[in-house]
Image: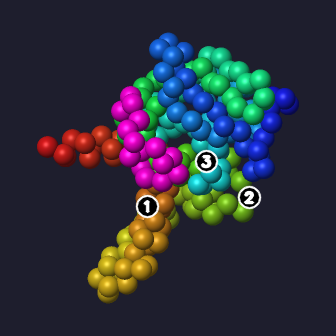
Amino acid sequence: MSEVKLDDKGLVPAIAQDINTGQVLMLGYMNPGSLKRTVEGTQVWFYSRSQEDLWHKGEVSGNYLNLREWYVDCDADTILLKVDPDGPACHTGMDDLPDEYTNTEGGPRVLDELFAVIKDRQREMPEGSYTAKLLSEGPSRVGQKVIEEAGEAALAAATGETDNLPAEIADLLYHTLTLMASVGVSPNAVWEELRARRG
């Protein structure tokens, strides 16, 4: 790993390719920590630039990328990951990535990345982490925070404070994901329930 060249942000682009079909699945970024976890383990980890933390690909959807081989290009500034995917690599659940989802820094992927960060905090329980402290207080306390944030979001909408509404909803989503992590419920179970209600 020492030969890999990082950019000025300490990252290196990594291309995931299906070892069975040759299809390019996605482009992500790695830092030394995610690269170490990937090559020393069996599954792919990336670095989320939006969350500024490690991201275990597939932790929410269950569609992990199982590492089979990895290579560094001749300039040592790009990594090729040959993987055996458990399912679609795209966060939309589709095998091919449509144009409207080429922005990897926003949209549904944010929830995937955020839940991965929460689960990482739950495993590591780092000192000084708000998420770790909240999880240590148990589901009842996390549930109380969800109720508080839901009330604040509803109040902002009811009083016409729409400038504050996105932030209030973001707080609500974060605490809801934290509640789910505290009781061992995956967001994928919620996505399946929502899909069932589309009819």
Residue 28, horizontal then vertical, whole percent: 59, 38
Q: Crowding at label 3, few (<14), some or many (≥20) Cα neighbours within 10 Å?
A: many
- Residue 3 occupies which quadrant of the picture? top right
**Residue at the right extreme of this rendering:** 2
Q: Which residue is mark 1?
A: 173
Residue 2 left/right relative to 69 = right
Q: Are marks 3 and 1 in contact (CB under 8 Å)?
A: no
**For the point 19% across and 46% down, which residue is it?**
197
Q: Crowding at label 2, few (<14), some or many (≥20) Cα neighbours within 10 Å?
A: few
- Residue 136 occupies which quadrant of the picture? bottom right
Residue 57, horizontal then vertical, whole percent: 54, 36
**For the point 26% across and 47% down, which residue is it?**
194
For the C terminus, give its image quadrant: top left
**Magenta range:** 94-108
Q: Crowding at label 1, few (<14), some or many (≥20) Cα neighbours within 10 Å?
A: some
Residue 36 left/right relative to 144 = right
Q: Which residue is mark 3?
A: 48
Which amino acid type is marked by label 2? Glu
Magenta stretch contains residue 191: no
Which amino acid type is marked by label 3? Ser
User: In terms of secondary structure, where does tag 3 sit?
Assistant: strand
Is label 3 or label 1 in front? Answer: 3
Determine if residue 131 is in view.
yes
Q: Which residue is mark 2?
A: 127
